[in-house]
Amino acid sequence: MTFLEFSLNLPCNSDKLFQKITDFESFNQYIPNQLESIEVQKKENGKIFTVEKIRSISILKNSFEQTSVHTVKENELDTEIISGPAKGTIIESFFQNIDSGTEVTVKINLKLGLKYKLFTPIVKKVYKQMLTGVLYRINREINE
């Protein structure tokens, strides 16, 4: 298991940020080079199931699909990847109001299949860069 945790402060309203981050069908507009498509398959019992088609240029040099289940709670989004190369990965995102906007904390328990273990350091770096970039893009959109 590989753990990754990071936080950042964004000068935007936490409710608006949370609303955008949980609008899964629009999510690929923030990372179009990595996320070809995302489709909500079903919603049941407070969980949202999505299928993501991911373009991996740097690691696998092809596209792959993964399925995720997202649990939306108050000021928290928990995602578990249930199929694909990162099956078993859990991403917890917390959105806390602060005086200057929103503090976002992301905790990732990264699990990669045996075939992909060699790429763990790269995947860790890519996850952090990608999620940070998405949050900054959403922040910029909210503040425009």
Image (spheres, rainbow, N blue to C red):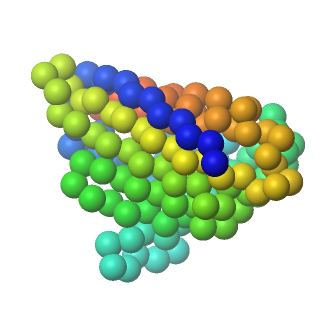
List the single residue furthest toward the left.
99
List the single residue furthest toward the bottom.
44
92 left or right of 120 in image? left
At 58% from the left and 28% from the top, the residue drawn is: 129
When the figure is inspected, residue 61 is found, relative to residue 11, above or below; the finding is: below
At 47% from the left and 34% from the top, the residue drawn is: 5
At 42% from the left and 69% from the top, the residue drawn is: 48
52 left or right of 21 in image? right
Front residue of 9/26: it is: 9
Front residue of 38/98: it is: 98
* Residue 38 placement (x, y as % from top left): 57, 58
Residue 105 is at least partly visible in this image: yes
* Residue 115 placement (x, y as % from top left): 86, 54
When the figure is inspected, residue 135 is found, relative to residue 49, above or below; the finding is: above
| Number of callouts | 0
List the single residue furthest toward the front.
1
When the figure is inspected, residue 27 is found, relative to residue 119, above or below; the finding is: below
At 52% from the left and 54% from the top, the residue drawn is: 90
When the figure is inspected, residue 65 is found, relative to residue 55, above or below; the finding is: below
* Residue 20 placement (x, y as % from top left): 35, 45
67 left or right of 11 in image? right
Q: Quadrant of the C terminus?
A: top left
Among the 4 quarters of the image, the one containing residue 37: bottom right
* Residue 75 placement (x, y as % from top left): 24, 48
Residue 32 is at least partly visible in this image: no
Among the 4 quarters of the image, the one containing residue 2: top right
